[in-house]
Amino acid sequence: MKKGIHPDYRPVVFQDVSADFSILTRSTIKTNDTIQWTDGKTYPLVRLEISSASHPFFTGKQKLLDTAGRVEKFNKKYGKKKS
């Protein structure tokens, strides 16, 4: 590998502020914030608004839409009129 062309791949903490959920993983993202992790070390911190801990798809709180009813309503309102 060439020296000096690759980004710094390091441990980073991603924190979902809405669900009080944090995960330590590796990333090349740049940030100025830091946090002290449970192991006592300080890591760069990236704050997220949504993650798997708060996203409706992963939490099971997703609402299903009735698409068949919407299509029928549209066709009834704007569809071809019978002569």
Image (cartoon, rainbow, N blue to C red):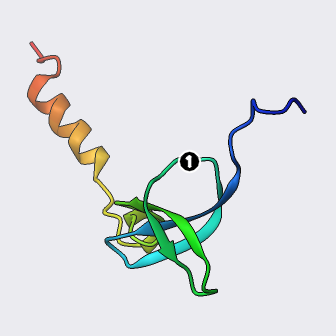
Looking at the image, the residue that sits furthest to the right is 1
Looking at the image, the residue that sits furthest to the front is 4
In this rendering, position of residue 66 left or right of residue 19? left
Task: Out of 74 and 30, give the one closest to the viewer.
Answer: 30
Residue 64 location in percent, x, y?
Answer: 33, 59
Quarter of the view holding residue 77: top left
Residue 83 location in percent, x, y?
Answer: 9, 12
Residue type highlighted by circle 1? Ile
In the image, residue 37 above or below residue 81: below
- Which residue does the image show at 23% across and 47% down from the upper left? 69
Label 1 Cα neighbours within 10 Å, binned few <14 / some 14-19 / many ≥20: some
In this rendering, position of residue 68 left or right of residue 26? left
Residue 23 location in percent, x, y?
Answer: 56, 72
Quadrant in the picture for the N terminus: top right
Residue 7 location in percent, x, y?
Answer: 68, 39
In this rendering, position of residue 74 left or right of residue 24? left
In this rendering, position of residue 11 left or right of residue 53? right
In the image, residue 70 above or below residue 35: above
The residue where tag 1 is placed is 29
What secondary structure is found at the residue carrying circle 1? loop
- Which residue does the image show at 30% across and 45% down from the upper left? 68
Task: Out of 57 and 55, give the one closest to the viewer.
Answer: 55
Q: How many marks?
A: 1
- Which residue does the image show at 38% across and 79% down from the upper left? 20
In the image, residue 61 above or below residue 50: below
Looking at the image, the residue that sits furthest to the top is 83
